[in-house]
Every structure is written in structure tokens, then in C-alpha cells.
Image (cartoon, grey):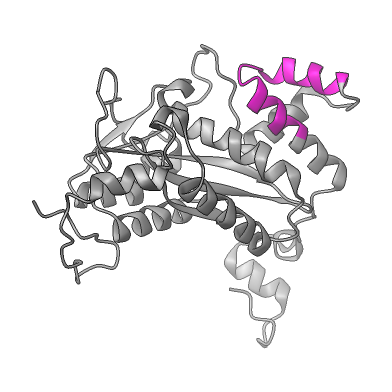
């Protein structure tokens, strides 16, 4: 909104906009190497021991040689979207303007592809900086249907992944997520409602409600992310794309009778006849014809 070519001075423009000049001149400082190393250590500890709170996390980090305070650990955990798994009162309040939906998977027998999709967000370490990854998984086959990277925890990259999944696959009956603000937002839930998809959300602190995609994060990080130092988001996207393709097409799961996610998903899809895609919206998907 500030126009450097204007006849008005920067000071006057800031005054008219009620914007402090310090805010106009401020430039975000890059994350230093020490903080990046600390964030990587926090991520690894959280994967191995998701019950660690900020106090125990601080103690474990100090055992590893990091001189860090609890307040810094708390700040970085919030930045990374990491919350310890244990009962706690009112420490992860959702956005009060967003609706929260009940958990629909308790006692449900998942017997076919596109019966239930699940989604989650995780932190991805890079050589300089970090980003966030959202993925959508078909619960029956464990197939990753769509994913997106972003350098901010906004809602857009989550809705983009959802739009892509719905554009390429028949809609699910149930879509399950946690209670993160990205998934409870009107932008995200309205897409699900437009497609008549039932919305399910994990209970607070109940990581086990979405355990299969949590297990995928663990495999992805130990087998791919921690072995590399991505120089940029495009490079991270390239390597993650290769890993996810291999996971879908080549990785055999003992829980799937030693079959790959793609083969299990495709076996279900053979009973569907493709329909013409909805031309009214690029987000809409062909629905199965019976």
C-alpha cells in the first residue's frame, strides 16, 4: 500500500495509513543455523516420544548439548505445530469462530477405498529454513491421494490438496482430520459440505485417532527428510514426490497382505465406471457410477 514513487513522503503515507514506520521498514531476519538444528532435534524427539512436554523436551535437548530455555522450546513447538500427547486442560483451544465436528470413526469397520479419507499437517526441515506438508490418505488402502507444501501454516495449501484429491478420485463418505484451525476453517469444511462428505475430527490430544497418517509421517521423515538437507521448497517437492510415488506404487505393507497401496486402491476402483467430471468447478470430482 506504500507507494515509493508517490509525491507524499513515506512518513506521511505511514501516518495516513496509521502504520508505524518501523513496521514498514522491518524485514524478517532469517532463522540461524543453531535454531534450525534445535528445531530438527525437537522434531526428532517428538516423533520418537510424542508425550514429551516443553519441560521434558528442554531436559532432553540439554542432554544433547543444547543450552536452551523452556520458553524457547515452547515458542519453537508452537511454530512447528507440535503439541505433546497427554491430558491437559485448555491448552490447545480451537478457533472459537470455527465449528468442531464429532469423531465418526470409533467402532467403524473400514472395508473399502474411498470410505474414509484422513489428512494431517507436519513440519519439514530444510537446509535453510523449514516448510509444512499436508497430505490426504485413503484410510483403507493407505494410498496418498494428494499433498502440498507451504512455507506458512495457512488454509490455502490444505484446500488446494483437498481440491486436487477430489478432482482425481471419487469423493469419500467420511473425511477425518484433527481440530487444527486449517481443517476447522469455513474454507475447508465448505468444500466437504458441497460434496456431501461427512466431517469427522479427532478428539483433543488424541493422536491415535489419526494413527495411520501419523505412522506415514514417521516413515517419511526417517527414510527421506532426515537423510537430506533440502536447499529450497522446489527441491523438497521433487524429493518428496519421488518418495510418495515409491510409497504408493512400490512399498508393500504387511497389513495389506504384502500389497502396495496403489494395488489395493485399484482393486476397489475396478468396480467403478468413470463419470464425466463436473464442469462447473475445477474442484469437483467425478462421482462413482454404479
Residue 100 visible:
no
Q: Is residue 130 left or right of residue 1?
A: right
Q: Is residue 160 left or right of residue 38?
A: left
Residue 259 position by quadrant = top left
Depth order, front residue of 249/94: 249
Q: Is residue 82 left or right of residue 253?
A: right
Q: Which residue is depicted at the point 24% across and 52% down?
A: 170
Q: Where in the figure is residue 59, as x and y percent of width and height?
A: 80, 16
Residue 168 vs 96, above or below: the answer is below
Q: Which residue is depicted at the point 27% across and 29% down?
A: 110
Q: Which residue is depicted at the point 42% across and 27% down?
A: 255
Residue 28 vs 102, above or below: the answer is below
Residue 161 position by quadrant = bottom left
Depth order, front residue of 222/31: 222
Specify whether residue 1 is painted magenta: no
Query: Looking at the magenta stretch, what is its main secondary structure?
Result: helix
Residue 82 vs 62, above or below: the answer is below
Residue 52 visible:
yes
Query: Which stretch appears magenta?
Result: 41-63
Specify whether residue 42 is painted magenta: yes
Q: Is residue 127 left or right of residue 216?
A: right
Q: Which residue is depicted at the point 63% across and 34% down?
A: 78
Amino acid at each position: 500500500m506504500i507507494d515509493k514513487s508517490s509525491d507524499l513522503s513515506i512518513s506521511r503515507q505511514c501516518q495516513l495509513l496509521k502504520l508505524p514506520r518501523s513496521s514498514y521498514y522491518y524485514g524478517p531476519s532469517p532463522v540461524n543455523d543453531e535454531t534450525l538444528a534445535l528445531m530438527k532435534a525437537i522434531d526428532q524427539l517428538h516423533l520418537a516420544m510424542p508425550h514429551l512436554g516443553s519441560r521434558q523436551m528442554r531436559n532432553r535437548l540439554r542432554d544433547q548439548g543444547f543450552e536452551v530455555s523452556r520458553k524457547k522450546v515452547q515458542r519453537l513447538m508452537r511454530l512447528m505445530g507440535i503439541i505433546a500427547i497427554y491430558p491437559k486442560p485448555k491448552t490447545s483451544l480451537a478457533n472459537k469462530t470455527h465449528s468442531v465436528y464429532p469423531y465418526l470413526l470409533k467402532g467403524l469397520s473400514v472395508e473399502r477405498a474411498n470410505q474414509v479419507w484422513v489428512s494431517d499437517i507436519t513440519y519439514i526441515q530444510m537446509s535453510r529454513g523449514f516448510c509444512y506438508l499436508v497430505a490426504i490418505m485413503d484410510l483403507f488402502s493407505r494410498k496418498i491421494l494428494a499433498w502440498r507444501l507451504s512455507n506458512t501454516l495457512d488454509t490455502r495449501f490444505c484446500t488446494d490438496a483437498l481440491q486436487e484429491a477430489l478432482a482425481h478420485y471419487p469423493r469419500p463418505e467420511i473425511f477425518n482430520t484433527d481440530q487444527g484451525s486449517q481443517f476447522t476453517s469455513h474454507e475447508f469444511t465448505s468444500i466437504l459440505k458441497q460434496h456431501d462428505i461427512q466431517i469427522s475430527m479427532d478428539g483433543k490430544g488424541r493422536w491415535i485417532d489419526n494413527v495411520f497418517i501419523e505412522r506415514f509421517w514417521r516413515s517419511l521423515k526417517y527414510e527421506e527428510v532426515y537423510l537430506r538437507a533440502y536447499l529450497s521448497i522446489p527441491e523438497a517437492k521433487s524429493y518428496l514426490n519421488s518418495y510418495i510415488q515409491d510409497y504408493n506404487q512400490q512399498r508393500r505393507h504387511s497389513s495389506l497382505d504384502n500389497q502396495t497401496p496403489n494395488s489395493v486402491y485399484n482393486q476397489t476402483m475396478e468396480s467403478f465406471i468413470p463419470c464425466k467430471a463436473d464442469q462447473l468447478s475445477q474442484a469437483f470430482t467425478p462421482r462413482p457410477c454404479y
